[in-house]
Amino acid sequence: AYKEFLDKGGINDFINEKLSDESIYEDVDKLMAVGQAIRDKIMDTPFQKDFEEELEKQWQRVSGGSDTFTFAVRSSATAEDLPDASFAGQQETYLNVMGYDDLKQKVHLVFASLFTDRAISYRHDRGFEHSKVQLCATCQKMVRSETGAAGVMFSLDTESGFKDVVFVTSAWGLGETVVGGTVNPD
């Protein structure tokens, strides 16, 4: 959906043009201006009709049409957790999202968050092509964290890069505490 949004919205050329200027990576003010311009372009570009229809259909299915049903809208990038780079936590997450209009706006914001100043700089510094990193917005039922635990699962050991393991970390409360490193997870 993200790739189609960029392709059909005509945003790719704009992004590539803005990020091809090497001088932005030497000047924080230029980088911030470029990042903001890209995020604005993404936010100003409407979703395609078929995407909006499917998003609303799924919102209706999961929430039962209730504007008080809460969602977590999270990002997941294609290059989040590699042995030599970690993109985790660079894109935005929105919690306690209520109603279809709010959900749609937060999906838009998650798409735009692939181009935060920090994310642009990180990819450039590590030699990743901006156009090769893709993103999805995951809309999940918000859990009541005061009564349970949450965490993160990886299909490799994030410390060694060993691929034949499922690595799970968790803690009481929201998974944000695990992702953000504010707790020592189990």
Image (spheres, helix red, strand yellow):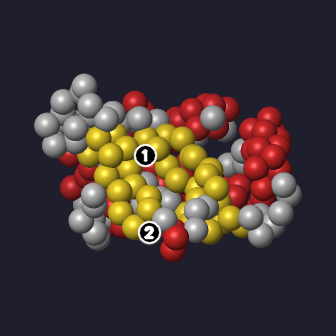
| Mark 2 residue type | Gly
Q: Quadrant of residue 181?
A: bottom left
User: In the visual, does 119 lie left or right of 96?
Assistant: left
Task: Count the numbered circles shown.
Answer: 2
Quickly name the residue at label 2. 173
Q: Is residue 7 above or below residue 93?
A: above
Camera-nearest residue between 144 and 74: 144
Residue 52 visible in the picture: no
Q: Quadrant of residue 173?
A: bottom left
The numbered disc on residue 99 is: none
Residue that appears at 29% across and 70% down: 182
Residue lying at the far bottom in this picture: please name it: 146
Residue 161 visible in the picture: yes
Residue that appears at 40% across and 67% down: 172
Q: Quadrant of the N terminus?
A: top right
Q: Quadrant of the C terminus?
A: bottom left
Nearer the observer, disc 1 or disc 2?
A: 2
Quickly name the residue at label 1. 18
Q: Dot 2: what SS? A: loop
Q: CA distance from mark 1 to mark 2?
A: 40 Å
| Mark 1 residue type | Lys
Residue lying at the far top in this picture: please name it: 164
User: In the visual, does 43 lie left or right of 117?
Assistant: right
Is the residue marked by circle 2 packed among few (<14), some (14-19), or many (20+) residues within 10 Å?
Answer: some
Residue that appears at 74% across and 38% down: 51
